[in-house]
Image: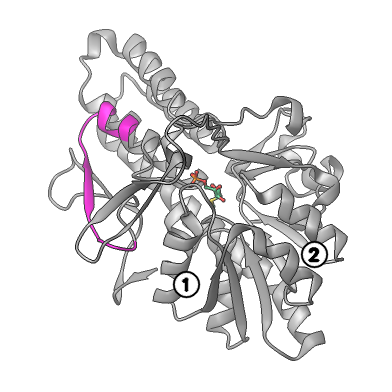
Amino acid sequence: MKIKGKHYHTIWLKKDDPQTVQVIDQRKIPFQFEVFNLRTVDDTYFAIKEMVVRGAPLIGITAAFGMYLALLNTKQKNLEEHLQKTADYLKSSRPTAVNLAFAIDEMLEFILKEKENPQLIQETLEKVHSFKEKEIHYSEKIGEYGLQIIEEIYAKKQDTVNILTHCNAGWLACIDWGTATAPIYKAHRKGIPVHVWVDETRPRNQGARLTAYELGEEGVQHTVIADNTGGHLMQHGKVDLVLVGSDRTTVTGDVANKIGTYLKALAARDNGIPFYAALPSSTFDWKMENGLAEIPVEERGTEEVAEIEGWTGTKIRRVRLIPENSPVANYGFDVTPARLVTGLITERGVCKANKKSILKLFPEKIQL
Ligand code: MRU
């Protein structure tokens, strides 16, 4: 998608320098546009942990590039041991999004299988690029299938379709298109009038900062709202559809996503509003059955809640929000039980949030 009219992906290999991976520094958006360089595994770990990059599909691809960087910096002698350690280290950067472990395991398996191949480095890089291309394709297909849901609402309503979204499940969270935003971009490009209610998404404000920014760059009508506004809007008929992303969805359809998603699902159910999660197959946890009991929910630093970051007009600044000695808790994600989810939008189509329906779309996962 575009930033100031120029097409970007969120991650790429630096031109003429195959030892450097570049990403958009999402800690600075929308105030500054800066590119952040990854040259080592430590750089990669830092970028994921500190949320230079974030969003489930993007942290998966970043970690895949991280395994490539590990390979560049490893002596053949200790390859297996070193890469196994690197894999564990990168996996520990953020626990909730399953895309991270999925991408790392695939890369590890590939590199170890090909370790005698004289073209190993080149082929590993090609593998990362094919991963990246796959994620773009997944997002685009999600856009096409999700578009049909928006079209159906528009066909009945014959007026602007109001969509509420939480956090940033946009192209900045992926490589291109996004997951929850992909159907919105497709609808907008098709001339269907859409308007997006953008939850600010405290504590890190990914909605207010990132989703609002990318919708603005694409010319999509939107309004930023405080996190607690959604229920009120739903009660007053101002939301036609809730569309969110996911960091991990169990094979039974429980959806982990940014903290606050569950409350939107509850309000949507109470008001008879469809609640869809959009996710690629890389976000399914094929082995997990009980999201509430099993999905690890990240707890982050208390400063994210105790402070807030903004733009002074010349620089990004953080200020304290709460009394000096008040304790703080900072849970990054919550789990919306499958019973509250109207459907899942995937690259293979839309399905119900239950095991039978999910596995009907992905029959090759049955034996897992
Ligand atoms: O903490 P973040 O910003 O990485 O959380 C991101 C989300 O919760 C997104 O909704 C999710 O990763 C889906 S991204 C397509």
The picture quadrant where one finds residue 64 is: top left
In this orientation, which residue lies closer to the viewer: 319 or 259?
A: 319
Q: Which mark is residue 215?
A: 1
Q: Is residue 33 magenta?
A: yes
At which x and y percent is residue 322? 46, 42
Left or right of 260 in this view: 201 = left
Foreground pick, 247 / 266: 266
The answer to whether 293 is drawn above or below residue 197 in the figure is: above
- Magenta residues (range): 30-46
Indicate the secondary structure of the residue bearing disc 2. loop
Residue 191, image x, y percentages: 58, 88
Asked where in the image residue 169 lies, by quadrant, the reply is: bottom right
Q: Residue at x 82, y 53 (%)?
A: 352
Q: Nearer the viewer, residue 7 or 322?
A: 322
**Would you say the residues marked 2 and 1 are in contact, meaning their CB atoms lie under 8 Å apart?**
no
The amino acid at mark 1 is: Leu
- Residue 30, relative to residue 344: is it above or below? below
In the image, taking residue 55 as reference, residue 118 lies left or right, namely: left
- The amino acid on which the numbered mark 2 sits, given as a three-letter code, is Pro
Residue occupying the point 77% across, 34% down: 366
Q: Circle 2: is it few (<14), some (14-19), or many (20+) Cα within 10 Å?
A: some
Q: Please give left or right for residue 22 compared with residue 49 in the image.
A: left
Q: Position of residue 138 (x, y in %)?
A: 56, 56
In the displayed structure, would residue 149 be above or below residue 207?
Answer: below
Q: What's the mark number on residue 293?
A: none
Residue 126 in magenta stretch: no
Task: State the SS at label 1.
Answer: helix
Residue placed most toward the observer, 120 or 174:
174
User: Which residue is denoted by mark 2 in the rendering?
Assistant: 274
* Residue 118 visible: no
